[in-house]
Image (cartoon, rainbow, N blue to C red):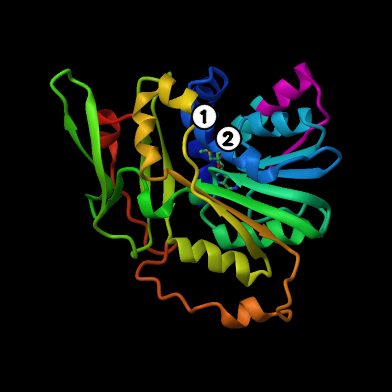
Amino acid sequence: MASEDGKQWNDAADSWVEFVRSGKNYYSEYLNGPALKRMIGDVEGKTVLDIGCGEGYLSRFFAKAGAKVTGIDISQGLVEAAVKEEEKHPFGIKYFVADAADLNMLKSESFDVAYCFMALMDIRDYEGAISEASRVLNKSGRFIVLIEHPCFTFARFLDGKVVSDWETRVREDGSREYLFYWVADYLRRHSYAVEWKHDRLSSSFVTTGFHRTLSDYVNALTKVGLVVTRLDEPQPLEEGVRVHPPMKKHYRVPQSVVIETSKVRIGLGRGYAHAHAPQQKHDVKPSENILHASSTELRNKYSR
Ligand SMILES: C[S@@+](CC[C@H](N)C(=O)[O-])C[C@H]1O[C@@H](n2cnc3c(N)ncnc32)[C@H](O)[C@@H]1O
């Protein structure tokens, strides 16, 4: 299954690389990228791991800021694009094609900071990925996760029906007004086909998304001994709203959440988090019962 996920992102590679490098990924440029950078702060002289690095634009950003960066991604096509860029403009970044849940090529306790930017909700074995991130972090290291907000996931499909989305109406001038966000089913875990199709992409493609709850993510982090130190539900930069006015709706409802965790223990005995993690009852185990539904219709209507 992991190789299928890699294949989907390989098939998407050309379109994704063009999308990111042309600056048309407005959500990364004006909302999520700035939020991650704020949370990570100064990286001068630090060892940094980019998990699900894609074609490497954030790896390059942190390398330029003085970090010693390693990037890993399951897609060979995207890693090749990252390596080509590194060959053209060397920053000393090392890249590996790998499943985030198996980072055997990386030594334990070898990174000051690890982050997973807009990728954990696309990673099948998210608990394995979190466990590996914790393993490779130094004793006082930090792991920062930025994901599409699981409470407000854009046009999520379950059993062939949309179960969470923006309610909109078309104004007289033809523009779309985003009224409110609705959620019909949040607690069922499932996977679904994410159809990337809008006018800022050179060609459309399909990937797999995994819906989990916020508590699933937080409990998976605390289970491996990571302590949640900060949360952010970021708002877009004003410049972003000027460039892409539909982003204004995220002044009211967040598109993403940033979770900062640390290996530092704050007075709780070792094993506390594991012993006290609530037991999750999953209606649908993502890896066993995969529900595929199409979101083409909505993605065509409202590009994000
Ligand atoms: C939405 S893209 C984000 C890429 C990059 N972080 C960025 O912002 O440009 C999601 C990334 O997750 C990667 N991915 C999906 N499953 C993965 C896995 N199991 N292990 C590592 N990377 C994975 C994909 O190949 C893809 O590059």
Where is residue 285 drawn, in percent x and y? 41, 66
Q: CA distance from mark 2 to mark 1?
A: 7 Å
Report which residue position mark 1 lands on: 30
- Identity of the residue drawn at 54% across and 33% down: 10
User: Which residue is located at x 71 percent, y 29 percent?
Assistant: 60
**Res. 33 mark:** 2
Work out whether residue 168 or residue 51 is closer to the camera in this orientation and state it.
168
Q: Identify the amino acid type marked 2.
A: Gly
Specify whether residue 224 is painted magenta.
no
Label 1, secondary structure: give it.
Answer: helix
Picture coordinates of residue 82, whole percent (x, y):
68, 28
Quadrant for the C terminus, please: top left
Tell whether position 95 is magenta.
yes
Residue 175: numbered disc: none
**Type of amino acid under label 1:** Tyr
Helix, strand or loop at mark 2: helix
Figure check: 302 above or below 4: above
Q: Is mark 2 within 8 Å of ligand 1?
A: yes
Q: Residue at x 51, y 54 (%)?
A: 124
Say if mark 2 contacts mark 1, CB within 8 Å: yes
Percent from the top left, x then y, of residue 52? 61, 42
